[in-house]
Amino acid sequence: MPPARLAAYRDPVYLRNRPIVLARDPMCRLRLAGCTGKSTTVDHVICVARGGSNDLDNLVGACARCNQLRGGAEGRATLKRRAAERRRTQ
């Protein structure tokens, strides 16, 4: 994971809110394909790269599988957006 992305997960606000979110959301809130049902990770509703924060209202409990699927989809969307921007500037 790039250092800039890791900084969001080392933020004291995130570290303080993580156990609160896992207690608040014991069941996965994303419910994507292959969901295990139990929240073991915390996911940002609006990712930090797009201006999301580590506040409680932007964090939800998610199972590891759903978190991985959603994060991968966001990464692919970012790559597509950047490629389109490069084509427009050429």
Image (cartoon, rainbow, N blue to C red):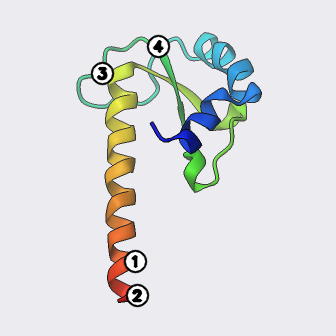
The residue that mark 1 highlights is 85
The percent coordinates of residue 13 (x first, y second) are 76, 28
The residue that mark 3 highlights is 35
Question: Viewer-nearest of labels 2 and 3?
Answer: 2
Q: Residue furthest left?
A: 34
Earlier along the polypeptide chain: callout 3 or callout 4?
Answer: 3
The residue that mark 4 highlights is 40
Q: Is mark 1 on a helix, strand or loop?
A: helix
Other-residue count near label 3 (Cα within 10 Å), few / some / many at <14 / 14–19 / ≥20: some
The label number, if any, that marks residue 89 in the structure image = 2
Q: Is residue 46 above or below residue 23?
A: below
The percent coordinates of residue 46 (x first, y second) are 56, 46
The percent coordinates of residue 36 (x first, y second) are 31, 14
Other-residue count near label 1 (Cα within 10 Å), few / some / many at <14 / 14–19 / ≥20: few
Q: Give me the residue at 31% from left, 53% from top.
A: 76
Question: Viewer-nearest of labels 2 and 4?
Answer: 2
Task: Identify residue type, mark 2.
Answer: Thr
The label number, if any, that marks residue 33 in the structure image = none
Could you tell me if the residues under marks 2 and 1 are in contact, i.e. CB atoms within 8 Å? yes
Earlier along the polypeptide chain: callout 2 or callout 4?
Answer: 4
Q: Give me the residue at 33% from left, 71% from top.
A: 83
Question: Viewer-nearest of labels 4 and 1?
Answer: 1
Q: Quadrant of the C terminus?
A: bottom left
The percent coordinates of residue 75 (x first, y second) are 37, 49
